[in-house]
Image (cartoon, rainbow, N blue to C red):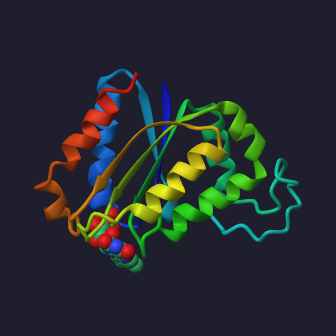
């Protein structure tokens, strides 16, 4: 499979990137190709809602979303990776998702497999409720096939994350993809 990871943490060496790297290693060892796109350091502007794309057509904004579009439409799987920010994904990753607007039908037709990787400071059982509700709704709306989630409770720093079981869980998710 061709896997595209949308890496939504601004920290290149943070907790999210630990999960992403482990997932990538597992996926590559299972024979998949896995590309990580650092959406936080790319030139990506939020959707301006003009709907000139008509929900499927060229976007008036010419930025790095064009490459992301091409890559996603050639992929078999998309991975959403984000630290938890106020109980949702980061604004940078959400901007990429909102820009799906201009290739909504194409994306839908791809029937991509998908996964969610996230980390949070909190460890309460409700920590990821809003994020997972959003992710599951995206899976349903975008005709994705969920392959799993790794939700890093109590992963507030890279040190906390490294000493947790979540990096191994991210590796296993990649390694055990069909
Ligand atoms: C702006 C901001 C908002 C955050 N919101 C939450 C939150 O709602 N719940 C939580 O448990 N942790 C929250 N955190 C903590 C991060 O999710 C956590 O530290 C995570 O490990 C950061 O991942 P990173 O190393 O990839 O940046 C927030 C951090 C920041 C900077």
| Quarter holding residue 148 | top left
Query: What residue is rendered at 83% in x and 51% in y?
Result: 58
Extreme residue in the bottom direction: 86
Q: In this image, 49 relative to 29: left or right? A: right
Q: Which of the pair 91/113 is nearer the observer?
A: 113
Q: What percent of the width, then of the height, locates residue 54?
A: 88, 54
Find ligand 1 in the image and state its quadrant: bottom left
| Vertical comparison of 46 with 169: above or below | below
| Vertical comparison of 162 with 125: above or below | above
Q: How many labels does the image show?
A: 0
Query: What residue is rendered at 31% in x and 26% in y?
Result: 176
Q: Dividing the image into 4 quarters, which one contains the C terminus?
A: top left
Query: What residue is rendered at 26% in x and 70% in y?
Result: 121
Q: What percent of the width, then of the height, locates residue 126?
A: 33, 66
Q: What percent of the width, then of the height, locates residue 128?
A: 37, 62
Extreme residue in the left direction: 163
| Quarter holding residue 24 | top left
Q: Is residue 43 visible?
A: no
Q: Can residue 81 be seen in this view?
A: yes
Q: What percent of the width, then of the height, locates residue 79?
A: 47, 44
Q: In this image, 165 relative to 62: left or right? A: left
Query: What residue is rendered at 89% in x and 60% in y?
Result: 52
Q: In this image, 174 relative to 161: left or right? A: right
């Amino acid at each position: 499979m061709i896997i595209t990871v949308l890496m939504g943490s601004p920290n290149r060496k943070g907790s999210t990137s630990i999960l992403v790297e482990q997932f990538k290693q597992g996926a590559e060892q299972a024979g998949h190709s896995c590309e990580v796109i650092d959406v936080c350091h790319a030139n990506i502007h939020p959707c301006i809602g003009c709907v000139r794309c008509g929900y499927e057509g060229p976007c008036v904004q010419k930025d790095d979303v064009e490459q992301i579009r091409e890559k996603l439409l050639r992929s078999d799987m998309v991975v959403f990776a984000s630290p938890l920010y106020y109980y949702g994904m980061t604004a940078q990753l959400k901007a990429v998702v909102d820009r799906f607007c201009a290739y909504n039908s194409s994306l839908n037709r791809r029937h991509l497999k998908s996964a969610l990787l996230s980390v949070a400071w909190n460890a309460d059982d409700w920590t990821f409720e809003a994020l997972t509700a959003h992710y599951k709704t995206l899976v349903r709306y975008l005709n994705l096939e969920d392959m799993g989630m790794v939700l890093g409770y109590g992963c507030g720093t890279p040190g906390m994350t490294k000493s947790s079981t979540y990096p191994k869980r991210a590796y296993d998710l990649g390694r055990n993809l069909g």
